[in-house]
Amino acid sequence: MTEGKNELEGIGGWLILVAIGVVFTPIRIAKFLLETYPPIFREGAWDALTTPGNDAYHPLLATIIGAEMVLNLLLLAASGILLALFFSRKAAFPKWYIGIAVFSLVFIALDAMAIKLVLPDEPMFDPETASELIRSLVTVVIWVPYMLVSKRVKATFTR
């Protein structure tokens, strides 16, 4: 039994794909944050979106954008924690992974619905949002069950 457990211990097998995702997720989120939010504040868009009387104004838009920024910053921080948990092989890693995966899926869907309320003429899922939703759905459908049943996960994250 001990010999079989040792074979499954460590980052190998399908867990390598999880490692790739865990490493690149903070980079992907940081890139999104840097590309999306600074232009809103630098180019006068914030005033146009949040000043009553402007064509782009909607009373909920500032709240939605603010919530998006805060939640994306929290996801960035959580993905950094997840990275540390992964490489230190902490027993908490699978639970954090599952929590972040489910939260991300729900966040993307609710955010798209909120934007649709504010901008009813725009599609609910533009190509970028649809891609993120599908990526999150695949993560939840494939990797959450893997975290729950994998012998390698159980043998690796024990500290």
Image (tube, grey):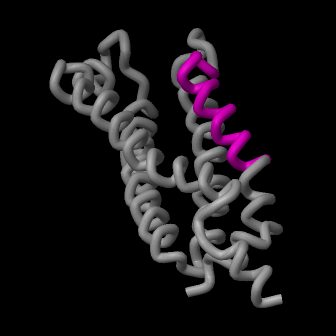
Q: Give the extent of the magenta segment.
A: 125-141
Q: Is residue 138 magenta?
A: yes
The residue lying toward the viewer, choosing from 155 and 49, is 155
Majority secondary structure of magenta residues: helix
Q: Is residue 117 visible?
A: no
Mark yes or no: residue 72 visible: yes
Compared with 12, 20 (above or below) is: above
Up the image or down, 78 lies above or below 17; here it is below
In the rendered view, does 135 fall on the left or right side of 150? Answer: left
- Farthest-out residue, front: 3
Residue depicted at x 54% and y 48% = 21
Q: Is residue 91 left or right of residue 6?
A: left
Question: Residue, x 65% and y 45% (percent of image)?
Answer: 105
Q: Residue at x 45, y 37 (%)?
A: 64
x then y, percent, for residue 4:
79, 80
Snapshot quadrant of residue 130: top right
